[in-house]
Image (cartoon, rainbow, N blue to C red):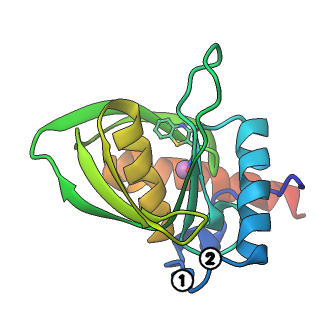
Amino acid sequence: MALRDIITLPDKRLRLVSDPVKSVDAAVRALVSDMFETMYDAPGVGLAAIQVGIPKRIVTIDTAKKDEPKRPQILINPAVVWSSDEKAAYEEGCLSIPEYYEEVERPARVKVKAIDLDGKPVELDADGLLATVLQHEIDHTNGVLFIDYISKLKRDRVIKKFTKAAKRTDD
Ligand code: GNR
Ligand code: NI
């Protein structure tokens, strides 16, 4: 078990389309274990492998509140197979865009298919925060960030802020 570094804007790897996992082997299990450790430490309610620099379609999620028992969920090769016409708005944040929050509207309910750590197919029906986090994480596996859904003015402003901050730290 190890903490891994979370990559942040403007790291171009956040725009990669991650590769499907072909077999759930020891390396995948070790990565999943590190992702949970990194996600709980951050803390965050979800994490995609690309956020620790690994372009594989692997997602960890735990939307349990602080006073509730842990509820770890692992999704390998996840895909949204149905989404509701009804939308829901959530104030979203992202560990790869630290301390920036904006309201995003997405389908309120989704059905997601994936495989678990045993390579077995799983199907999830989600609403509320879980539906939003599932979509946010599956977006990461496709190189999509929540700022892609806000106005271009706000998006350009936040990208510029992180680009400037990165320039200041490497000179
Ligand atoms: O910790 C997180 N909180 C969150 C809140 C609202 C919508 C999505 C999220 S996911 C985020 C962690 C993260 O960046 N996952 O990719
Ligand atoms: Ni994120």
- x, y percent for residue 21: 56, 80
- Residue at 17 percent across and 38 percent down: it is 87
Residue 121 picture quarter: bottom left
Left or right of 170 on screen, residue 153: left
- Residue at 87 percent across and 64 percent down: it is 170
Label number found at residue 55: 2
Quarter in which the N terminus is drawn? bottom right
Label 1 SS:
loop
- Residue at 72 percent across and 55 percent down: it is 35
Q: Foreground residue, 41 or 60?
A: 60
Is any atom of residue 10 visible in this view?
no
- x, y percent for residue 92: 45, 36
Residue 95 picture quarter: top right
Q: Is mark 1 within 8 Å of ligand 1?
A: no
Is any atom of residue 13 visible in this view?
yes
Label number found at residue 19: 1
10 shown above or below 90:
below
